[in-house]
Image (cartoon, helix red, strand yellow):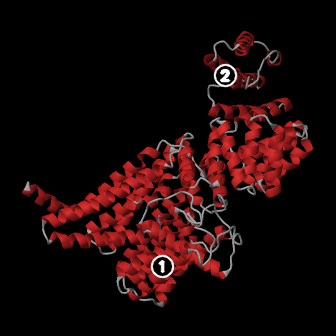
Amino acid sequence: MRNVLEIIIRVSSQRQGFVLLVLAFAFTAVIYRPVMPGEFVWDDQGHFESNPLIRRLTVSRVGEILSSTVYDIYIPLTMLSFALEYPFSRGSPAVSRINNLFLHGGVLVLVYCLALQAGVTERAAGMAAFIFGIHPMHVEAVAWISARKDVLSTFFYFWALLQYMRYLRTRERGRYLLTLFFGLLSMLAKPMAASLPVALFVCDSFTGRRLTRLSVLEKLPLALMLFPLAWFTLSRNLGQGTAPLPVSILTWFWTFMFYLRKFFIPFNLCPLYDWPGPVSWPQEAYRNALLAGMALGGSGYLLRKRKWFYFPVMFYVATIFLVLRTSPHGVGLTPVADRYMYLPSLGFCLALGAAYDRLSRAVENKGRGYFLGTQAVVGAIAGLLVFSAFHQALIWKDGYSLWGYVLRRDPGNPVAHGNLGLAFLRDGDKESARKHFLSAVRLHSMDAQNYNNLGNLFYEEGRRQEAKQCFEMALRLNPAHAQAHSNYGVVLMEGGDYARAQRFLARAAALSPGQPDIFKNLGNVYLLQNKDVLAEHAYLQALALNPSLLYVHSVLADMYLKKGDLDKAAVHFSEILIYEPDNARVHNSLGAIYIKKFDPRRAVYHFREALRIDPHYGNARNNLNILLAQTALPPEEGNAGWTMGKPWE
């Protein structure tokens, strides 16, 4: 037994870094395994599920992605990653979550490599990667599909840091160019990477490099690349929240200290946080945050020679700065978010890894008992973190678990009530949806989205007048609410008020030009007014945004048939077959079109496909029999009597 323990100690000392890295992968897989078969939640609809930009990747679509934002954030590389995986996802979130997990694994490898570049032992590097991998505060960035931008940006950010650290050692020009390249990719994944030039100065300080003209000029090309891209996002969010200077200071310090507190005490985490109260000096939370922040600043100055204290704090300041709030009003539903700590936590993970290595070396010299006792304590802490992260990951499985968790922590959260109501409405539980929508309206009666949600419920229940009133209230509260304009236009259209419906739907399309359903409804109202040219244009715009709108393909095919444009009709029927290859009615319609185009070979193929799918389809059988019997007739006579049928009957 004694020999076995000695072997364990020796292996742990010599290869513990590799063992810890393997354990990081293993525990990461355990933590995130339950969430893999989950559902889309929260902003996943705008980022992935209903995002028309990612549905079919073409050269023109890449151009649109490069010139578009998602929720006013410029993340083209993240959108390209979604577009690349969309054909394999088949509408399921599992592929996207698995890719998030793979990216997270890649980040762990980079943390390990960065730690080695920083000069620590393999054991310290392994522990740094282990802490980064299992930390509960990182769960939101990995488990939530919409947070892909955080993981992807961090992946390239760490690559840039790694190349820069090697550049500082070798002065190879290629390493410097790779730093610029990976920095640009990180920025295209998320604007938070605009902090990279500042982070490189922190790396300079860590390695003992003095501030010189050359060290400044080296960062200039990176700044010139990144800051204009950051402005693409920043310009869309300026002026959405201002506060007096004392309030701004207290707000800034509270958010600054919040992330530090949650990193070192990562419990009671939540997707939605709220302010601890009115922002003022008498409020204990803000006062304590200000005093703690000032104490940390003073400690940083006094311990500036201690690089494993100075580096993590300065790296944190450099990378968290862009997401710190200076006003309790304005952008976002929550003042802070766990995912924002994914990148800035690197320095603390490296410092903790170095501290663990120093502690292990100290107890190794005191004997086996001290060593095993220390490892037991560290293992218990790690087990607690894994347990916390596992349960944190579970809440991201679906909308019910996510918003139910938020409401258990904060029963008066109107956003959680509204989103949970949407989950119930999607699954047909209208009674539960009504309860949560009404709670959301009661808790926040000035939020247009709450009335829009309630209006959708009334519309689903056939209560058109109540739905109309809710949409009107939503528009009074927010005249720029595109979905409320669209919903109100649909209600007016169904009530026969086509002129007003057209006006509201056109306004919705102008407010939100990336929503295919709005253009579909606009096409419908044009068609009802016999404005075929405008209807065609609106339908084509809907298909440009989402080529899988089969209803729109069907309507356009019928429109082209009536105009005698058989080629365009055939194109749209063929598009339907891409998504529904076993649609017998469409095969029959295409067969009839090819007869009129004097192409009996293709006509026979489609009639036979229709009969293969539905052997009792009378129209297809009659058409096939007529074709086979009259193939010797002149084409003009052969065109008579073909029955196309309706594609959707």
Local crowd size for mark 2, using a 10 Å CA cut-off: few (<14), some (14–19), many (≥20): many
Residue sitting at x 56%, y 44%: 400
* Secondary structure of residue under mark 2: helix
Instruction: Say if residue 490 shows up in the picture.
Output: no
Mark drawn on residue 584 = 2
Q: Position of residue 229 (x, y in %)?
A: 61, 69
Nearest the viewer among 161 and 179 is: 161
Q: Position of residue 628 (x, y in %)?
A: 70, 12
The mark closer to the camera, 1 or 2, is: 1
Q: Which residue is mark 1?
A: 292
Q: Is residue 465 above or below residue 286?
A: above
Answer with left or right where residue 415 lies relative to residue 3: right
Instruction: Say if residue 339 shows up in the picture.
Output: yes
CA–CA distance between discs 1 and 2?
A: 71 Å
Quadrant occupied by the N terminus: bottom left
Residue 206, quarter of picture:
bottom left
Answer with left or right where residue 502 lies relative to residue 474: right
Q: Amino acid at mark 2?
A: Ala
Local crowd size for mark 1, using a 10 Å CA cut-off: few (<14), some (14–19), many (≥20): some
Nearest the viewer among 321 and 171 is: 321
In the rendered structure, which disc, 1 or 2, sits on the residue that comes first in sequence? 1
